[in-house]
Amino acid sequence: AQKITQTQPGMFVQEKEAVTLDCTYDTSDPSYGLFWYKQPSSGEMIFLIYQGSYDQQNATEGRYSLNFQKARKSANLVISASQLGDSAMYFCAMRPTGTASKLTFGTGTRLQVTL
Amino acid sequence: KAGVTQTPRYLIKTRGQQVTLSCSPISGHRSVSWYQQTPGQGLQFLFEYFSETQRNKGNFPGRFSGRQFSNSRSEMNVSTLELGDSALYLCASQKGGTEEGYTFGSGTRLTVV
């Protein structure tokens, strides 16, 4: 079974600053993928970034980067140069590699970007 | 390209009724998954369909069912609705065979009164 832990229920960050959202995971699967999603108040889950467990380099997508530390089982999301539009819920999720498997989500972190 | 389309966006039903939700995946995507999101339980996996076959199922009672059609569109049905079924139901599509991100729809917000 997989478990995702997000220990920060809420975070505040000032516009243009960087922020790190924490995510730790637990799994016995040898190969897996880690995902981050953003959910604005509209409800849609927006895919941000993906990291495979065997990827040698940390994933980056524009202002998003994933700080992957496999030995510590952590996959923190770093958002650089925060914008007001970044205010939303952020979910970390994982899935074992292979077919017929599901995404397991954490409880989420609500990020508020302030002026 | 068109995203994942879920209909309806909002729905109000009475206890004991049944409901059908629809999801049209991105063109070319053959996998459709359904998730339930509630404040208390968070995001929970319901089931996944691939090429009209259910290939994974979450831990939900038999009142929750689904199907997928030959054009990859999927429906989920909840019978004998309970107050606790009030939730945001999210559908996600994926091409299949890739480890990249799933694309989610905007969800159907179901309220059971």
Image (cartoon, coloured by chain):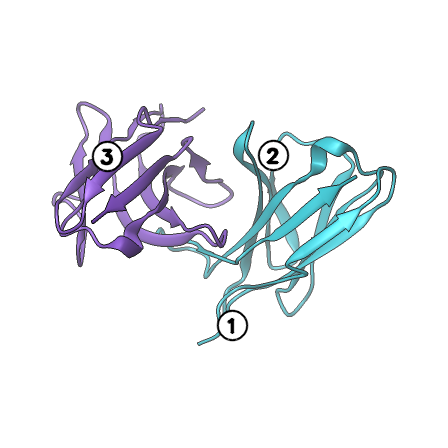
Mark 3, Cα crowd under 10 Å, few <14 / some 14-19 / many 20+, is many
**Real-space Cα distance between discs 3 and 2?**
25 Å
Left-right relation of B35 to A17: right
The furthest residue to the front: A115
Question: The numbered mark 3 sits on a residue in which chain?
Answer: A
Q: Label 2 sits on what residue type?
A: Gly
Q: Label 1 sits on what residue type?
A: Ser
Q: Mark 1 points at which residue?
A: B27
Q: Mark 3 points at which residue?
A: A75
Mark 2, Cα crowd under 10 Å, few <14 / some 14-19 / many 20+, is few
Q: Name the tint of chain A in the rendering.
A: purple
Q: Which structural element holds mark 1?
A: loop
Left-right relation of A46 to A11: right
Residue B38 on image: x %, y %: 58, 35
The C terminus of chain B: image quadrant? top right
- The residue lying at 31 percent from left, 30 percent from top is A30
Question: The numbered mark 2 sits on a residue in which chain?
Answer: B
Q: Can residue A77 be seen in this view?
A: no
Q: Name the residue under label 2.
A: B58
Using the image, determine if residue B27 lies above or below residue B35.
below
Q: Which structural element holds mark 3?
A: strand
- The residue lying at 32 percent from left, 44 percent from top is A36
- The residue lying at 61 percent from left, 47 percent from top is B89
Image-quadrant location for residue A29: top left
Residue A1 on image: x %, y %: 45, 24
Given residues A8 and B45, the one toward you in this image is A8
